[in-house]
Image (cartoon, helix red, strand yellow):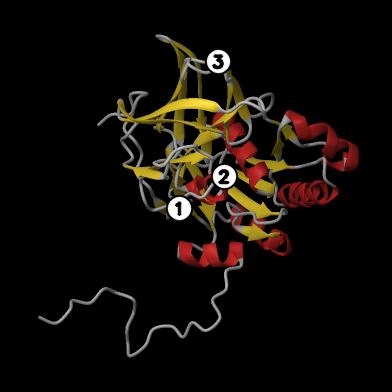
Amino acid sequence: MPSPDGLRPPGRSARRADDFEAGKGPRMAEERHLLVVAHTGRDDSLAAGIEVCRQLIAAGLTPVVSDDEHADLMRAAPELAPIALLGRDVATSELELVIVLGGDGTILRAAELARGCGAPLLGVNLGHVGFLAEAERENLTSTVERALARDYEVEERMTLAVRVKVGTEVVYETWALNEASIEKASRERSLEVAVEVDVRPLSTFGCDGVVISTPTGSTAYSFSAGGPVVWPSVDALLMVPLSAHALFARPLVVGPESALAVELLERSDGRGVLWCDGRRTFDLPPGSRVVARRSSIPVRLARLSPGPFTDRLVNKFRLPVAGWRGPQNGDNGATEEAPA
């Protein structure tokens, strides 16, 4: 089935980075452009950004940065003057890779900067959990070396296409990697909503809001709201009510071709706010309707050491696994048939 924006939904891939250039087929010899995204308002992130830029320059490349970070980097390290500016010197479509220095919020900002260009994001965690990051601060130099050598694999993550309608008019369109959350605009007044799946009504209730999430976002806001953790290899969409006043208001998991909708009922004058990844926002009047479905444009993540998602979950959340003895009697974890 074609996607809502007319393109075939992409499949998940894990292929070598040097097999293809982002969005251009087989790689051809040409100047390489690596975007460096850092939270330059923080000293540790600014220092890391300077270090990465110096390493790229030493390797014969011209680092690319966004307009928001250019002034901070130039002020702190004037010797980086050959640095290129995204949108002025280098187009987004020319990017090969995005090196992201910070926490998950910085990675979400980088995904916004690189939206649609096909360049994968390589995250170096400078925050707390850093669930989307691939490396830690102490491995920064070796991480850049592997980026220069194109020594990584690429994994595609589903994103959401989000649309707001008032009556028959589409008044806002955006996207999300983690989630689209419909939340009440004021603390003292809850929302009255109707939720639906595939243009069929499911239930109505009062609530603080509703989160519509991807599997990637299942460890973010959806997780905090009581939703299930969904492995990234699962193609699915999640809907998680927030503080709902209803007996049947449980988290839902639906197929990747489904459309999830939340309508703000006009029987209440409560106003809502749409947040996508905590970055893009739109005010929702009573009667507005938010529809989310799978987008045709994924976010691509660079992976240095692809491994089981279970291990990432344990490491990032520091889950207690003491006492685990591993496979016994040659059991490798595969499902065995029960004897007849």
Residue ID at (64%, 37%): 109
Q: Pinpoint residue 56: horizontal percent, then vertical percent.
A: 71, 49
Question: Any mark on residue 221, and which?
Answer: 2
Q: Nearer the viewer, residue 177 or 252?
A: 252
Q: Nearer the viewer, residue 118 or 239?
A: 239
Q: Are marks 3 and 1 in contact (CB under 8 Å)?
A: no
Helix, strand or loop at mark 3: loop
- For the C terminus, the image quarter is bottom left
Assess disc 2: are there few (<14), some (14-19) or many (≥20) residues with their C-alpha within 10 Å of its C-alpha.
Answer: many
The span from disc 3 to disc 1 (Cα, nearest Å) is: 30 Å
Residue that numbered label 3 is attached to: 285
Residue ID at (59%, 57%): 134
Residue that numbered label 1 is attached to: 228
Can residue 306 be seen in this snapshot? yes
Q: Relative to residue 174, is residue 324 depicted above or below?
A: below
Sequence-wise, which precedes: disc 2 or disc 1? Answer: 2
Assess disc 1: are there few (<14), some (14-19) or many (≥20) residues with their C-alpha within 10 Å of its C-alpha.
Answer: some
